[in-house]
Amino acid sequence: LNTSLFFQSATSFLVTVEDDISLVMALEPSDLSGSAYIVKITGESKNYFLEFENVNSTTPPPPMVFNASYHGLYYIITLMVMNDNMMTKPAQSVTVLTKPLPVTSVSIHDYKPSPEKGVIFEIKYPEKFNVFTRVNISYFEDKEPRSVLYKDFFRGKMVFKHWLPGTCYSNITFQLVSEATVNRSTLVRYSGVGHEPKQHRTVPNPPTNISHQIVHITTGIFSDRAEAGSGQGEEEANTLQPYDLTELKNESYSWVDYNYNGSDTQPSPSQPSWPSSRPYTPGDSEEFVNRPVEDYKDKNELGSATESPPAPTPFHTLLLQLQWLPPLPPNAYDGFNIYIYRDDTHTHTHTQWLSKVFTRSTVKSIIKKWREYGTTVNLSRTGRHQKLIIQARRALVREATKRPMATLKELQSSMAELGDTACGNNSPGSSTEVASVDEDTRDFSVELKEPGTYTVSVTTVSSSGVCDARESTSDNSFTLYLSPEGEWFEALQERPQDVNVMMLSPTSASLSWSLSQEIHSGSLVSLLSLTCHKPKLSQRMESHYCTQVNSSSSSIRNLTPGAQYRVVVYHTNGPLVGPPSEPVIFGIEPTGVRDLVLFPLEPTVLILSWSRPYHVTFRKYVVEMFYFNPATLTPEWSTYYEIAGTVSLMASVRVTNLLPAWYYNFRVTMVTWGEPELSCCDSSTISFITAPEAPEISSVEYSNRLLNVGWKYSERDTDLAHSRMLHWLVVAEGRKRVKKSISSDVSRFTLPVSRSVMRAVLSLPPGDIYNLTVTACTERSKNTSQPRIIKLEPAPPKSLFAVNKSQTSVTLLWVEEGVVDFYRVFCKQVESDGVLKQDQLRVNYHMVTVSSLLPSTAYNCSVTSFSHSTPSEPAYIGVSTLGMCNRETAPSLGSPDWVCVIERPLFCQVVHTGYV
């Protein structure tokens, strides 16, 4: 077993924690007074009871071992003594704490909102059966040990914001801490260190109050000077020219090539005071002396070409002077790096562009090299490797310190992994120079001899300690442009303010902005359509500004109605472009649709069709309709359908489930892709009253020349009070004309009925076949029910009379009733012993003379109406003809019922008293 890590004991009871989790319990022989000893262990979800074995009064029992389940959990071990099988009170209680498991993995990252003071700790540890309350973080701050207890870890992560900028924190370890308070005493156990110690350097604070000044140098003042090397001797490849200074400081600097992907940013607004910026002249009382060193001759040095290169194009040399103040405390730093990035893509010059670089404290080393070696040129050596930047050299030193037994090839291999970061490889047309100065330097000067765009930045460097060197990350660079004519333009710092877009027409706009306090040569307007790429390529309706278009004009043309644009304004100073303005996003209303037409198909179905202009872009059509909602009893607009916008100039939609005989107003609008959406136009509307549905005749009854008609309308429960139904029209159209009517050739009976009533009574002549319909009528349309064929029985003749009687004939006269095709007349002789029939007569008029009758004979006559081959009930009348009589024969009739009336001398009329 391992050495005991923790134990607690009483007078006769000893508990030891071994192997971090094993509880070893033992009794001492000084207090063996009981017959049995039981140990109770509490702390987990259940209690455990263990009994010591082989207990006697002289020899203590062997120790018991209990393997706990949890790491970092406290356990209470209670010893209970039994005498004569009787349990006594607990004799002793001991509290122990097991050791938590260690952290297995640690990651440290910068806290991006504040990398100067904050880091993110991410730890991994066994979570199952591992209990802890806090985490102990131990580290060295430079050389001072520090330790802190933290408990704000969430899922193994924590943001720590209490470190110092630029400081190297090494030997960072994490320990899980378990704590327990028992009887006013606190037990604490620390886990071991199960991970590799980490190190981390915070980002240093940047230098403050960086300022610069550009001074024109008089022609010939610094010409024909030998190039001087750096204070680091032959390590640096860039060349310098010597200057005599009255004040010399023992300070070093270095120049190296370096890849740098910088961007134009604003310089620090805080500028220190500068002396008068006038050209240098030989009479100036300055540290720089306009004369060559004695006995200096411009001759070819070892490793140089045998012929001098062609003279470059004359250029007015400029002197760039930098000044800055140290970073804000607290801050740990070792120096500063000055980055000068030159982009000569537009000037097409690749000659030496940085010939004179100096600080006031480094001229002494330049003159010393001149006096000692007779030259300031770095002499080439056979097999010399490409130079490394200062960060790569420091990394190489740290690697050699960590691995003193590493071979040269291994060190070269580790440097090769750095790639272009370690070596000064520059892309064609651009290059970056890096100068390193110590922490006491506050100014820097460099002579610019070639045209181009220069970006200059100063960063703070922290490299002391075993941590990797780091630079400040705050961007404080500034940019200037040197033209081939010697003019220089400084990058602008001010953004264009109050950019405003004023629409002149749906396809043109004008931009305006407030005046700038900085002097600039022009402005640049950048315009991009935000809606061009939203539809598919096959359905794209825009052709302009699908890619960013830059213009120097404040007037914008060729805009597309319905599109949304983002415009950004830049101020320009020569070829330099200042910071952008706040983006202004503006949208243009679409043109809307035109030629909106409507085609009704059914009472509840119609088609809407429309067209659009060619020069417009939009996302969708929205078809809306306005109507009186019978459910809510309110008029409302509602969206019926949405149609995706396409390149087609025509579109249509089928509208269904409309209410019959209802008023609707339809509107089609265009909706754009922009955010927020724009739509147009509310004026693209068309109104329509749907046709009514055809009613259905439900009942028909005819009685006493009156036709009772009932009908029903629509299966929907529609309140006709809110519909556009005007009235019902009941039409009964007969096949034949009533002979009494002279208005038309067809018998037609109509009756308008109020819309609230669905029953009508028509007075129709009998004897005809009628086509009965009910029509629903609105302001613009109507709809008729399915016709109902009704055949009415013909009526018998009315008011039948017998006139103009004679001995052999009689004339019958009656009134025509309804529609009759013809009449059939039949007279029958009345005799007691039989019936003598008379031939039936067919007449087409309401009067007929029946002849060939017997004189003095009684007849029963009937008249029947016929219509559409259907007979009516017959009308009956009794008639008798006149008889031949004289004075002598008249009394011989002998019957009191017969009276012979002598009218003329030759004839007499016998009238039976039973007939009229």
Image (cartoon, rainbow, N blue to C red):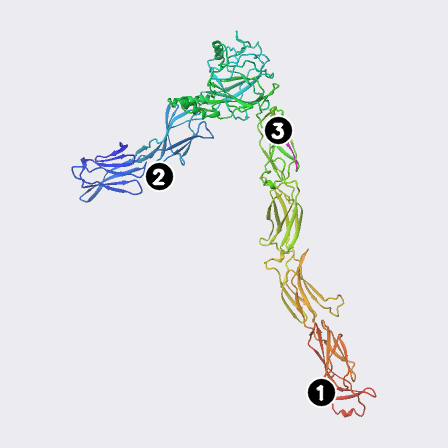
Mark seen at residue 524: 3
First reached walking from the N terminus: tag 3 or tag 1: 3
Q: Quadrant of the C terminus?
A: bottom right
> At which x and y percent is residue 476?
52, 24
Q: CA distance from mark 3 to mark 1?
A: 131 Å
Closer to the N terminus: mark 2 or mark 1?
A: 2
Label 3: element kind: strand
Q: Name the residue nearer the viewer: 582 or 609.
A: 609
Label drawn at residue 831: 1
User: Is residue 559 or residue 384 the one in the foreground?
Assistant: 384
Q: Residue 552 magenta-drawn?
A: no
Q: Which disc number belongs to residue 128?
A: 2
Asked whether, in this view, residue 806 is left or right of residue 447, the answer is right
Q: In the figure, is residue 195 to the left or right of 357?
A: left
> Residue type at mark 3?
Leu
Q: Is residue 315 above or below residue 788?
A: above
Q: Amino acid at mark 1?
A: Glu
